[in-house]
Structures are given as C-alpha cells and as structure tokens.
Amino acid sequence: MSAASTGEGAAAAPALAGAFADALASVPPTDEEAERALVAHHGRLTKPPGSLGRLEGVGARLAGIAGQVPPPLPTPAAVAVFAGDHGVHAEGVTPWPQEVTAQMVANFLSGGAAVSVIARQMGAPVVVVDVGVSTPLPPVAGDATTPLGDLAGVAMDGRAHLVPARVRNGTRNLRVEDAMTPVEAGQALDVGTAVASALVAGGARCLVMGDMGIANTTPSAALLAAFSGRPASAVTGRGTGIDDDRLASKVAVVEAALERAGFRASPERAGSHPLQVLCALGGLEIAALAGFAVGGAARRVPVVIDGVIATAAAVTAVALSPNTRGYLFAGHRSTEPGSAVGLELLGLQPLLDLELRLGEGSGGCLALGLLEAAARIPREMATFDAAGVSEA
C-alpha cells in the first residue's frame, strides 16, 4: 500500500474512541501454527496432495482465524447491508436519482432484492443499517425496525431487520470539500463495529459485507486511487452502467477530488493517516463497512468482502488495522476496475469471478458455500489410515 494507507510520515493520528477504537486495539493476528497444522492434515486426507487447490488454503485460513484444527463451520452467516447517500451525486456521476437508496432499503426489508434471494438460499439473515441515507425511508413494517442495542437478541431469527443508525443525511460533495468530519467518520466506524459485534453475539459465525448507496462507486474509486496511488482512470468504472461521456466526467470528478484533497500535489497530504483519507473521500456506509470488518476480526470470525464498495472499505479497514487482513475473504472479483486494484492491495484472490457488479453483498453471499466446504472437508473427509486406503 502507499504512504496514504500506512500513515508513514503523517501527522499524529486523529483521536478515535468508542466501539471501533476498542476493536482496533483487540484484533489479534491469525494463528499461523493452526494454519500449518491444517495444511499438514490435508496431506493425510484421501486425495492426492494439493488436489483441492485453493480450497485447501481457504480451510487453512479458517483454521488460523479460529485458532482451531479443524476449523469450526462458518455457519450461520449474516449479511449486513449499510446504506448511505453521497453529496457527489450532484456532480452527475450517475443517472439514478438519490431517492433510490431509500427505496432499495425498503426492497431489502421486503425480501425483494437480489441479495435477499441469495441470502435466503444460504440461510443468512439480512440486516439493513441506515447509516447515512439522505431522504426519508418509505414506511416499513413496525417489527422490522430494530434498535442497534437490541440487535444481538434478534439478529439470527431469520427476518430482515432495519437498524436506524443515521449519522447524517448523506455525505458532503467530495469534489469540493471533505465528505465527512472526523467525528462523523468515527461515528460511522462505531456503528459498523457495533453491528458486527451484535451479529456475532447473536450467533453469526461469518459476516458478509453489503452496501447500498446511489453514486457510491465514486467515493470508492477515490479511496482506492488515494490508497494505491493509481490514476482515477485505473479505478473508476461504469457503476450502474453509465455511457462513455458520463464515465469520462466521473473520472474527472474523482481526479478533481484527489487534487482538491491534496493527495496528488502535496507530499504531506499523501502521507495522511487513513482516517483522514476516509474523511476526505469516503462515505458513511463505506466507513461503517470498514468498522464492520474490524469488528468481525476482533471477534475472530471470517468476514467476506463483496464488490468494489466493500473492497474500498476493506482496504480502509486494513490501513487502519493491518491484522484485519487475515480475517478477510474476497467473495468475488467485480467487473469494476477498482475491484482488482483493491484486491491487489489486500493480497487476496477472489473466490468467484462471475462478472458481477451489483453490490448489496450478493457476490459475498454466493461465496459462502465455498467457505463452508473448505471447513467441512478437513472435519469430515477420511484420512488414508482411517479409510484403509494405500498412499502413493
């Protein structure tokens, strides 16, 4: 990662307090001895060495996360979709109206979104967190709204839950000013961490990162450009399917935001603390997702990244908490160009590559079956000795 992701040479880190700060101080490194033991165990199973390919490495990483061989099953899983709007929408980076964010929140809660369908298939409840929607939410069923403090008790009951945790009505326009203040970013980080903690306390053994926010591929591209040092054109994609003219305008907006914030011209700003990068260029749901990733790592459960928005959040999380990287799995590679750049920064290979670009946690959910298989194989597959099978 670049200097912007490490804080090297930067001013003192902005003060953080609350749930995120507590999690930040308690993310342990993964257990390398358990990983090695799982690799050795795979060598005794009734198959040629390495014949299950990358699935064997996934199992080893699960063992390292739990510090247990064989690893526990990463089930049940839970999906958290963090919703927020973006002031940069005013720059015309998408043709979709901002009201769609609130409308999609209602769609998640009624079970009609793509992630709702996939999550039902996987037996994973969906929790929708309003951390920064800019417009009023449509009416929802009375029992769908769950305060954050009550989430642990009902999180895994199979229903969709709306958690009202709005920090503010959307971010500011990152092209002309910082998107968030440090206080606002810290509050969003706290929300994400608290949601992760509540889901694990409620019984979740794997967490999936989901997002909703019209125009949120723009701040994601800006963050990835800042953390990687790549040009805006290398990380900015079509998002909801914009045409060439609007894409060129979107790239220009991202580059202008980087220039405005000093990440291109000022060596001092290029060495900013990751929280300062997040405040300048990020989004409330992106900050909450970063907190969610760190919160899951602090509770020693695997966290599955979805598309480019979740990837930008994961890069931010690892910049703030390097140990968190060991708990992350890339559910898939999005067709958004920033996805490949972000996964390269994280050093992660995607479990799937299906040319998805939806977000919501959809690709992360699709990868859950692979994680479960990677944990079941060393638990349930026979060894050569137990099966009476001769080795080569």
Image (cartoon, rainbow, N blue to C red):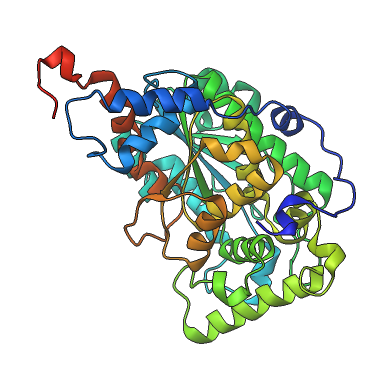
- The percent coordinates of residue 300 (x first, y second) are 55, 25
Q: Can residue 376 be seen here?
A: no
In this view, the residue farthest toward the right is 11
Instruction: Tell me what residue is drawn at x 22 percent, y 39 percent.
Output: 51
Instruction: Tell me what residue is drawn at x 61 percent, y 51 percent.
Output: 315
Q: Toward which corner of the image does residue 312 lie, by quadrant?
A: bottom right
In this view, the residue farthest toward the top is 386
Q: How many marks?
A: 0
- The percent coordinates of residue 63 (x first, y second) are 43, 25
In this view, the residue farthest toward the bottom is 245
Tell me: 372 left or right of 193. left
Q: On the rendered image, what quadrant is the C terminus found in? A: top left
Tell me: 5 left or right of 109. right
- The percent coordinates of residue 304 (x first, y second) are 46, 40
Q: Can residue 232 be seen here?
A: yes
Instruction: Tell me what residue is drawn at x 74 percent, y 58 percent.
Output: 4
Instruction: Tell me what residue is drawn at x 42 percent, y 60 percent.
Output: 334
Q: On the rendered image, what quadrant is the N terminus found in? A: bottom right
- The percent coordinates of residue 14 (x first, y second) are 86, 45
Tell me: 264 left or right of 43. right
Q: Is residue 164 shown above or below 231?
A: above
Q: Toward which corner of the image does residue 384 lie, by quadrant?
A: top left
In this view, the residue farthest toward the front is 392
Q: Is residue 171 shown above or below 237?
A: above
Front residue (pair 273, 359): 273
Q: Toward which corner of the image does residue 13 lie, by quadrant?
A: top right
